[in-house]
Amino acid sequence: VTRLEERIRSGLQETAERIPETAPVRETRRLRSSRPAGVWAAVAAVAAVLVLFTPILFFGGSEPGTTSAGDPQSPFLGTWVTTDFLSTMVIEASEDTSVEMIVHDFFPVCRGASTMTGIGRLQTENELVFPAPVLTCDDGSQPETISGPPIEEELQNLTLTRDPATDILTDNFGKVWTREGADLNREPTAPPSEADVTELLNGFLEARVAGDAAQQYLNVPEEDIPLLYATSSGALYDRSEFEPVRGIEWPYGLTAFKVQLFAGATVVEQLFFIPPQGRLGLDYVPDGFGTDIAPTTEDGQPVVRAYNAFDGEVTLHVAHPWVFRSDSGAIRLIPEGPGVQPTTDGGERNDWDELVMMADPAPVEPDCQTGPSPADAEALAESIRSFPDLEATAPVAVAAGGADGLMMDVVIAAGATVCETGILNLVFDTNAEIKVDNGVATGRATGDWMRLYLFDAPEGSSMRVMAMAIVAPESRFDVAVEAAAPVVASIEFHTP
Amino acid sequence: LVYRNKVSVTAEDDFDVFYQTWRSPIRRSLALALGDVGLADEAVDEAMTRAVARWDTVRGYDRPEGWLYRVGLNWARGVFRKRRYELLSDLEASSQAWDDPLPDPDLIEAVGRLSLKLRTVVVARHHLDFSTAEVAEALGIPEGTVKSRLARALHQLSQELGEPL
């Protein structure tokens, strides 16, 4: 070991030791409240696993809380733990018919620990409502709400819904709570047998052909399955088949199946997944986990889905190989070709081509300070063209969805310094050196090309300019732009 | 020959030990690599959540903590991309800097000037104390790439710090 290496080692170790320990703060409030159903499918799968782990991790497998028979509130009493490890909740009977609740670290809105208390009453047999919970920071500071309404307003009528079959609570923020000391052996740990899987799929498909109650076979019953009981023309299904899909198991251990539903000569195909653990059920993943298999086709053509953006002010219609990633807000082009590895390695592939929308993107000054939003598409186009190190074609007038706009192609040389804010974020290289200073990150340009559409939003919109960008390396740029054409043409603006 | 004891240790026990053992070191490594403690907090918890969801697979890896480090890094890189959608602006408010004086500020600043690719390798090698083979496995890159990145990082640090190689 050289002296330099020793200095690196000791410097890193000593610096690391000065990083204070903190409680887990995995999710921000806004992310939590915006998680879509598809993500909750994954959360539900995690929850099933955590039913096994949580009590051991945090309570040493202690005995279940006591409840008194005959008390309608008793199923809710006891100590509960969220499946994301973040929060604990104690519910105790009060002197009257109400219950008292104490929750630790419900929201990460304090610099340290927080405590929430409240008085609740049963609204229905399986719903417990707390009209006005109070959350305080344990260090005496005020909770900081970064976005959304004040915390006390957001917490009003906090509702816990209990599933009597599983003894699991879900609150209206989507948190899943399991009971301290839950039965560890309730969930199967072995992978489902072939017979069980066959029975599940047969039941699901028979229900779809019968036109009723197919959702019970899903891990997330409220998942929006395209063409669930009929084709796009309304024809009912008359028969079905399924077959396993190999090669996309790693490393989640998912089992994939392609199901086929027939309505006369029309064939609907869909991709479903079965998790290796937990409740035996089917998952439909709108992006198919990024495989090169369209999640739903009708007569071989990918089914178009409508997606809303900007609180419904913009609608797009997207079909495979474009996929909409609700968790990131991105519309991405699945890499082409058979045998492409799925993006199920626990991280995210970095080289997907993207179609990105932004409302009123701010021009970014060379020093990375954010300037005021341009008044219209033309002003934004001019500000972009004036940025140093940037090449742009002359804007061309376009129209889509009833809005007028400009189209231009933009290139910043790979390695040029760019900011991660504003429209230049689209070519910000997250693999290169990144400097973060007061929340502003600067880095290097990827060298990707951008096709920019800058639309003047209709009168009455909450935004002045809606920017849409197709971002791809030069080598794939033409293909991505061509593939994006139907998506761009599908834009619809809706004024409130 | 060392056998991993997969018979008598249950998955639940296994993950409990893994969580207690590795959350803090990986979090600190991510903070060093990313230069952002708040982001590291988010990244390690996200990675742990993914680990528990597929623990039966992850526990079979030779170095599950290496997988955890990579997943945390991948997730954090995604944050920079996601910021374009302004979904994660809350993160900036939760970021925090080191309050105490750093023991070797010149070194930390020089490490901070390394590209993220070089920095992640340096932190894995010199903070997590992984061998070059283990770094390669953790980051999913060839060992030769690890060695070349380490060499480039050491060269850059040597020049910036005025230390001989």
Image: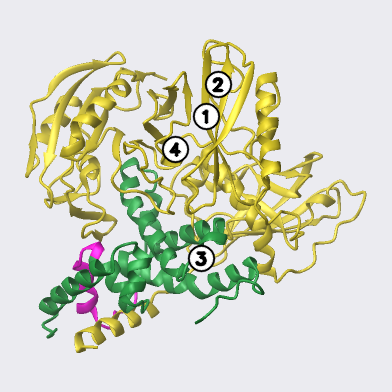
Chain colours: A yellow, B green
Q: Quadrant of the N terminus of chain A?
A: bottom left
Q: Nearer the viewer, mark 3 or mark 4?
A: 4
Q: What distance separates the C-alpha of mark 1 from that of mark 4?
A: 19 Å
Q: What distance separates the C-alpha of mark 1 from that of mark 2?
A: 10 Å
Q: How many marks?
A: 4
Which secondary structure, mark 2? loop
Identify the disc placed on residue A112.
3
Q: Nearer the viewer, mark 2 or mark 4?
A: 2
Residue at screen point 38% across, 62% down: B70
| Residue A142 visible here | no
Chain name for mark 2: A
Residue at screen point 12% across, 52% down: A415
Amino acid type of the residue that numbered disc 2 sits on in the rendered structure: Leu
Q: What distance separates the C-alpha of mark 2 from that of mark 4?
A: 20 Å
Lateral position of residue B162 relative to residue A165, left or right: left
Lateral position of residue A35 relative to residue A198, left or right: left
Which span is picked out in magenta? Answer: B98-117
Q: Which residue is mark 4?
A: A326
> Same chain for marks 1 and 2?
yes
Q: Nearer the viewer, mark 3 or mark 2?
A: 2
Earlier-in-chain disc, 1 versus 4: 1
The answer to whether marks 3 and 2 mark residues whose Cβ atoms lie closer than 8 Å is no
State whether residue A482 is above or below residue A29.
above
Q: Which residue is mark 1?
A: A270
> Residue A163: x and y, percent?
75, 44
Amino acid type of the residue that numbered disc 1 sits on in the rendered structure: Gln
| Residue A169 visible here | yes
Amino acid type of the residue that numbered disc 3 sits on in the rendered structure: Gly
Q: Nearer the viewer, mark 1 or mark 3?
A: 1
